[in-house]
Amino acid sequence: MAALLFASANAQSIATFDGAKATTLSWQTVNDPVMGGQSTSSFEVDANHHLGVWTGEVKIVPFLKAPGFCNLQSPGLGKTADFPDLSSATGIKVRAREATASGLKQFNVMIMTSGAKHFFKQGVYSANFTVTGDMEDHVVNWSEFTCTWRGEKVTWCPELSSQLSKIDNLGLGTAFPGTAGPFSLEIQGIYGSSSISSTDSGYIELASFDGKASHKWHSENDPVMGGRSSSSVKVQQSFADYKGTTAIVPALGAPGFTIAMTEGFPLLSSFPDASSMDGLTLSVRQVASNFTGYKIAFCDSRINFYRCQMASFKADLPVPASATANGDFQDVFVAWSKFSDKWNAATGKHTAENPPKASSLKSITQLQVWTEAVEGDFHLQFQYVRASKAPKAVASATVIV
C-alpha cells in the first residue's frame, strides 16, 4: 500500500472537519463488542485545527487472548447515509497522522454498500494503511480492498467497481488482527483518490517492512515424527531476517522443513488483488550461506486455516549466489506458471502442474517462505514480496524463474 502526497485538487472530498456542509458527517465509535472485548475509543472534532481526533486503546480480549479492535463509522453501526459516487476514483485517500510517538500505526479503511448484502449479512470492503507521525496522504487503491463479513473473507460480495455508486457507510478501524495499545489518530480528511495506481508501476506491494504493506511474520518448524528443524524470523532495518537449520527427521531419514509466514490466522489477513500481475517478485540476499532449499508459497480464501500449510500454491525460490550480505538485495521473479498446489508433502516437489487461477490470485490470505528437502543451516533476508509484471528483459539485477 502506497503512502503518497497528492494535492487536494486530485481528490474528491468525502469527509472533512472544516465545517463544510457537504462533507461534515456524523461519526460513531464502535468497539469490539463480543466475547468480553474491552477496547475503548472516543471521537471529537477539533474545530480550531479542522481535524477529527479519534483516540482510544486496543486491549486484549481475555477470552481470545488476542487484541480486539476499535472502529469509527459514519453514520454509525447499522445506519446508512448517502455518499458521493466514487466510480471515477481509483481508490480512497486518508489524510491523517498518529499524534503520539508510541501510538498504533496500523489502520484500515472500510466501505459498506447497499449491494454487498447476502441475506442478513452485510459485506465490508476493507484495506489496510500505515500512518506515521506526520500528516500525510495515504492512498489505498481499489485493488487492495477485500470483502469480509465479521472479519472473514467472503466470495459473495459483488466486484467493488460495481458498488462505488452505492456506498452507504464509511469507516476507519484499527488493524485486525493487529496489536494492543493506545492510539490518537488525527484525521484531516477522507477523499476519493485520482492518484496513479501502483499497478501502473508494474507491481502491487503484498508485504514489506517499510510501513507500506505491513504484516506480522512468524516461523514454524516440522512438528511431526521427531522433526528437529528450527528457525526464527525477525524484522530488522526494514527487512525480514529469517535463519535457522533444516535438519534430518530421524524417523524419515530425510530433511524436514521450516516456514516463515504472515499472520497465523490467514482468513483474517488482507492482501490486494494480484490477478492483474504475472507472478511474485522477492528482494532477497543470503548471509554466510549457500543454502538451496528455499521455496515461496501462498494460500487463498478457498483453503481453510487448517489446510493452508499443506495445500498452498508453492514454487522453487532460487536465491542467486551473487545475492549475499556483502552486496545488494537482488530481485527474484517467479511466474504464476511455476506455482502448483499439488506437491509432495515430504519434498515440496510438484506432483502435478496446477497454477493458480484468477480467483485464487484475487483472494490471497497468507504468504510463506519455506526451507525444505535440503539439509543445512540457512540465513535469508528479504525486503519485500510483490505481485508484479514479468521483467521485459533478463538484467543482472533480476533473476527470472
Image: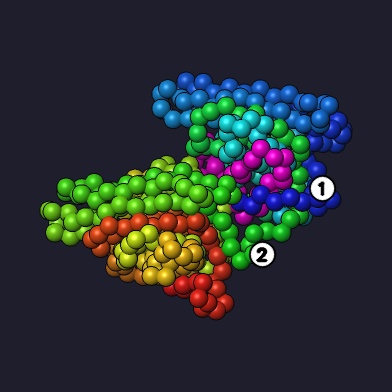
Between 350 and 181, which is closer to the camera in this rendering? 181
Query: Which residue position is annotated with label 1?
Result: 8
Residues packed near mark 1 inside 10 Å, few (<14), some (14 to 19) or many (20 plus)? few
What element does badge 2 sit on? helix
Q: Position of residue 166 (x, y in %)?
A: 72, 44
* The C terminus sits in image quarter: bottom left
Q: Are marks 2 and 1 in contact (CB under 8 Å)?
A: no
Q: How far across and how far down the image is residue 67, in percent? A: 48, 30
Q: Residue at x 86, y 30 (%)?
A: 19
Which residue is denoted by mark 2 in the rendering? 200
Q: Which residues are magenta?
A: 128-154
Q: Number of callouts in the render?
A: 2
Q: 386 or 323: which is nearer to us?
A: 323
Amino acid residing under circle 1: Ser
Q: Residues within 10 Å of mark 2 (few under 14, many from 20)?
A: few
Residue 323 appears in view: yes
